[in-house]
Image: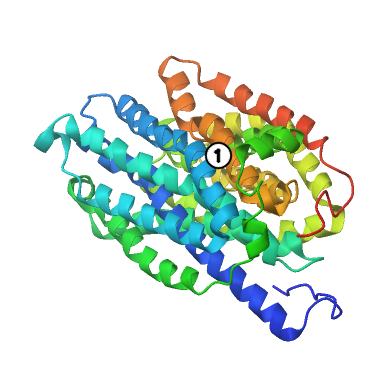
Amino acid sequence: MTTPTASPALYTGEERSKRIFAIVGASSGNLVEWFDFYVYAFSALYFAPAFFPSDNPTVQLVNTAGVFAAGFLMRPIGGWIFGRLADKHGRKNSMVISILMMCFGSLLIACLPTYSSIGIWAPILLLFARLLQGLSVGGEYGTTATYMSEVALKGQRGFFASFQYVTLIGGQLLAVLVVVILQQFLNEDELRAYGWRIPFVVGAMAALVSLYLRRSLKETTSKEMRENKDAGSISALFRDHKAAFITVLGYTAGGSLIFYTFTTYMQKYLVNTAGMPAKTASYIMTGALFLYMCMQPVFGMLADKIGRRNSMLWFGALGTLFTVPILLSLKSVSSPFLAFVLITVALAIVSFYTSISGLVKAEMFPPEVRALGVGLAYAVANAIFGGSAEYVALSLKAVGMENSFYWYVTVMMAVAFLFSLRLPKQAAYLHHDL
């Protein structure tokens, strides 16, 4: 893929190289963070019985999905803590601390005794580990999105900022790949007995590499900005930027819901609803996530051409029109190839949003409250709508109302479209200091 050429008047070759390295460094840590977080969802089919004994597989998945959702409830707290930390003490410090916290949570899960060993303490400790990870990832998104928007090259912000989701999706993809590889070498009983622990160990070890890269990053904030009386202030955020916060919250709600519907939940949907073998579902999601990852720079470049507001409007409109038809088709699909195509089409629609989501949010706030505004708005919307996606879907299925979930996603996509109308029409948006 050919990278667009920046205006020679804006950057020297050295400055351009430094900015690209900064994006690589920040996004590499992002990959590890999201690998650690998502590997829980993709391993749940195997470890659910170890922590939630039950004769009903759907009930087991509902319980594990509930713990997954609980991790999301910590995101607003993480968005606030790490957003404030990033605005007052620097983006770099915030990113280093968040990766360390995620590493500890993964290592804890890898070492947890099961329900048969310590009883009710097993799911309680699992919940505690997920809460730590939720706190970490709640701060990760806002800080990384802010940092990458601040180092992205002007005129190519959509392209370079899209690498946040390249690595975010890459984390998901690697989580799926690790599970697929384990499925080739371990049988079902071995995966349920101990194999599910291996991905969490891998994630904890990868965090050490990420830590090294992040420690070498250059800080993007100045001492003067960090000492600003409004830096990291939640009162200043709601006093002066309430409208921007509500707008970001509005379109992130639908964006988070549809993202998790067609990524983390989709593997379980193919197994639990379409009746496909777990291995087949893993293969389908591996291929779909790989294409989805590759789409991000393409859709980022498209946004640079047509405008970020237009990309967001296309996302809301297409999501509203096609969510129900795609999910209904997947419900009765028998061909793995057709399932792959349908999921890829859905993810292409989501790419209008994910490729530029961090950038669109960052451009709505000034630097002194940027990480806080982005992180908190994203975390609140994710906690309520993204983190509950699996739980709501599985709960509705358990009571025979699975189709209601499809319409729920559709309504939230319509909401995302309406809030996207509030975005400024000018390309530079609100704050030109980015």
Q: Quadrant of the N terminus?
A: bottom right
Name which residue lies at 18% across and 33% down: 121
Residue 332 visible to an observer of this rendering: no
Name which residue lies at 53% across and 63% down: 92
In the image, 300 versus 182, the foreground residue is: 300
Could you say where residue 327 lies in the image, as x and y percent from the top left?
Answer: 59, 32
Residue 17 position (above or below residue 266): below
Name which residue lies at 73% across and 50% down: 366
Name which residue lies at 80% across and 50% down: 308
In screen coordinates, is 116 left or right of 71?
Answer: left
In screen coordinates, is 109 left or right of 313?
Answer: left
Q: Quadrant of residue 343?
A: top right
Could you say where residue 146 lies in the image, as x and y percent from the top left?
Answer: 64, 55
Q: Amino acid at mark 1?
A: Ala
Is label 1 in a helix, a strand or a loop?
helix
Could you say where residue 290 lies in the image, as x and y percent from the top left?
Answer: 55, 58
Residue occupied by mark 1: 379
